[in-house]
Image: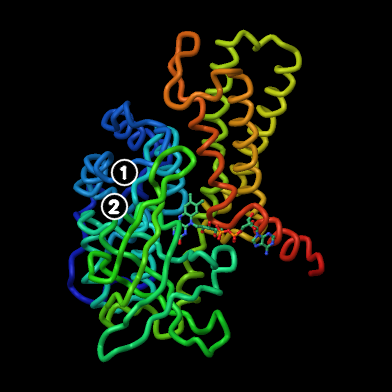
Amino acid sequence: MSPPTDTARYGVPQERDWNALDDETFRALVREDFETHYPLAWRFPPRRLRWHENRDWYLRMAAKGWLAPAWPVAFGGMGLSPAKLLIFFEEQERCGIARFQDHGVQMVGPVLMRYGTPEQQRRYLPGILSCETIWCQGYSEPNAGSDLASLSTRAELDGDEFVITGQKIWTTLAHDATHMFALVRTDPAAKKQEGISFLLLDIRTPGVRVRPIRDIAGTEEFCEVFLDGARTHRDNLVGGLNAGWTVAKSLLGFERIFLGSPKMPEYGLLVLESVARARGVLDDPVFRERLLTLRMDVAHLADIYGSYAATVARGEPLGPDVSLLKIWASETFQRIADLIVETAGPLGGLTGDVRIGEDSVNLLAPFYKARVPTIYGGSSEIQRNILARQVLQLPG
Ligand SMILES: Cc1cc2nc3c(=O)[nH]c(=O)nc-3n(C[C@H](O)[C@H](O)[C@H](O)COP(=O)(O)OP(=O)(O)OC[C@H]3O[C@@H](n4cnc5c(N)ncnc54)[C@H](O)[C@@H]3O)c2cc1C
């Protein structure tokens, strides 16, 4: 990624060169900051928080220059090395910090640094760093999820503007977003991957309608986004006409390792043990065997995660075998979440916080949380296909 080609200033200056610190000093410093300032009430929230709920924290991070730890300093990031970045994210997870609508920082920003024009970088990066613009990801459609390349939302040039018509779905927190980056079909005659472009769109524009979807947990985290002749200037095309697939693919990189982090299963185990204690089954031999199996699976996961993390920390690329980490983490978390509900007995069917023993626990929160990681970021079946084809070289 080359530095900005103009004199634009991005973000706020960094206090120091973080990479010059040794790992343990850096970890202690980040941990202290998070532990001191992140509100207790918002740790490990049972659902994805909305922008009005975690805005204060992320505005603080923006003002501190910590919003974009992976971005180069020249673009307003912390410029962390892979090893430091891993520590930063591990501490965020350890503290139970709620993720915000970070598609700008995690996705559009890096894409613009790599494929955007200097004008696009100047126009969009400062707003991402200050949280003035909040981005959502318009990829999936009712008939295009795992097989994303079959998407059918069209964009046609009309003078200097693209006119977009179609529908996106499962758009996380679109109701909090100001902008969307979308994959759209710009050449219906081309082979499916070759006729797709990557467009930026202000979703407050006429012709865009955002409708939240209420999920099984009763929350509204996803939306449908209807595009009915919505217009965006041709300057908002990133990476060239019909080159959107290449741009989209570049987003699948380093962050894949975090989908396999042991933190959620470890958190699930803590909840499971407190529920088991309250229900008086910790000494039950059948329960103990199940708990022990899960504990060993999580310990083993943490070990394997550590070896992938070391690869990342050395700055080496991850191979397709990293898919096993995501399957392992997400499916183990599901088994733990299922056992929490089972162990809670009749209480396991109650929504919201439930008084159990000394504690007040949202018993169904891990259960709901554990459903989604086997779907997003490539479902378990798709990950198994990757392992079968690219690692085991099986036919088909
Ligand atoms: C929490 C969460 C957040 C999301 N946020 C966004 C977002 O912000 N923006 C966005 O664009 N999308 C988002 N998505 C959508 C996500 O990318 C899709 O759900 C995912 O790609 C799967 O697509 P689908 O839901 O259409 O399921 P489908 O692709 O229809 O799959 C249905 C089932 O068939 C299986 N399957 C499909 N193809 C194969 C195959 N070739 N071999 C074997 N099995 C197969 C799948 O594994 C799955 O079990 C989000 C999803 C979740 C769960």
Q: Which badge, 2 or 1, comes first in the chain's sequence?
A: 1
- Can you identify the residue that label 1 sits on? 50
Is 295 positioned to the left or the right of 2 in the image? Answer: right
Residue 143 in the image: above or below residue 326? below
Is 147 positioned to the left or the right of 58 in the image? Answer: right
Indicate which disc residue 176 carries.
Answer: 2
In this orientation, which residue lies closer to the viewer: 268 or 257? 268
- Quadrant of the frame with the N terminus: bottom left
Mark 2–mark 1 distance (CA, rounded to whole Å): 7 Å
- Quadrant of the frame with the C terminus: bottom right
Q: Residue at x 49, y 84 (%)?
A: 195
Q: Mark 2 belongs to which amino acid?
A: Asp
- For label 1, the SS is loop
**Where in the figure is residue 101, as x and y percent of width and height?**
34, 51
**Where in the figure is residue 367, as x and y percent of width and height?**
55, 34
Q: Residue at x 21, y 42 (%)?
A: 60
Q: Residue at x 20, y 54 (%)?
A: 13
**Where in the figure is residue 366, as x and y percent of width and height?**
52, 32
In this orientation, which residue lies closer to the viewer: 250 or 48? 48
Residue 21 in the image: above or below residue 171? above
- For label 2, the SS is helix
Residue 291 in the image: above or below residue 102? above
**Where in the figure is residue 167, as x and y percent of width and height?**
42, 68
Residue count near mark 1 (Cα–Cα under 10 Å), binned few <14, some 14–19, many ≥20:
some
Is 18 positioned to the left or the right of 281 in the image? Answer: left
Residue count near mark 2 (Cα–Cα under 10 Å), binned few <14, some 14–19, many ≥20:
some
Whether tag 2 and tag 1 are in contact, CB under 8 A, the answer is yes
Classify the position of ligand 1 by quadrant: top left, top right, bottom left or bottom right: bottom right
Q: Residue at x 54, y 42 (%)?
A: 261
Farthest residue, direction right: 395
